[in-house]
Image (cartoon, rainbow, N blue to C red):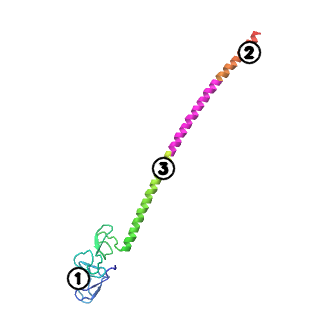
Amino acid sequence: MSILRELSCPNCLAPIDLKNHGSSIKCHSCQSQFILEGHLCPECNAYYKDEVAACGRCGTAMSRTCAKCHTSNWAGDEYCKSCGQAMDLLDIAVQSHHEQMALHTELRRAQIRDIRAQGEANSKKRMEEMMRAEKERIAEYKERQEQKRRRDIMLFFLMGCLIIGVIMIMLYAFFAI
């Protein structure tokens, strides 16, 4: 599909180059001035006073919907009449690609955030397990130390009793003679 570039003057049928005109058009042959109302087919230049969906002569679509604001625009418009969004197919494709890339990037960032959050949660869980295991190890160590202390006290008591017994036997043997 090509963008409308030329129109025939309705008075003298001379070609009018639309490149340098807006909605106000002047014929250079007959000097007629007029405002273009209605719609021209961007392919065959057929004029339609009322808005139509497709050209009756060549079948070209007469309107395009803005991807951003969903406003119906003439098929030859380069920019949306409502929001100014580019209507050129290449610009739309590039913009769509950028939007898809932005969406993809945001999805990847969300995945990265989720992975980091999961990693932090796993790390915290491992740390809690390690701290619990360390507390258990310390409690077991303290229990073993307490048992050893009790054994040492008992051994010291028995050794003391044994020494006292030996001393008593020696004294008894020494004074019994």
The answer to which image quadrant residue 140 occupies is top right
Secondary structure of residue under mark 2: helix
Label 1 SS = strand
Occupied quadrant, residue 58: bottom left
Task: Please provide the residue range marked out in magenta.
Answer: 126-155
Asked whether the beta carbons under mark 2 and mark 3 sit within 8 Å of each other, the answer is: no
Q: Please state the horizontal and vertical placement of residue 161, each as a whole percent of the image.
A: 66, 19
Q: Is residue 174 left or right of residue 49?
A: right
Q: CA distance from mark 2 to mark 1?
A: 143 Å
Q: Amino acid at mark 2?
A: Met
Residue highlighted by disc 1:
34
Is residue 169 highlighted in magenta? no
Q: Residue furthest top?
A: 176
> What amino acid does circle 3 point to?
Glu
Q: Which residue is mark 3?
A: 120
Q: Residue 125: x, y in percent? A: 49, 45
Residue 111 screen position, x and y as percent:
44, 56
Return the mark for residue 170: 2
Query: Along the polypeptide, which appears first: circle 3 or circle 1?
Result: 1
| Residue at left offset 44%, top offset 59% | 108
Rendered residue at 40%/70% (across/down) = 94
Residue at 62% over, 27% down: 151
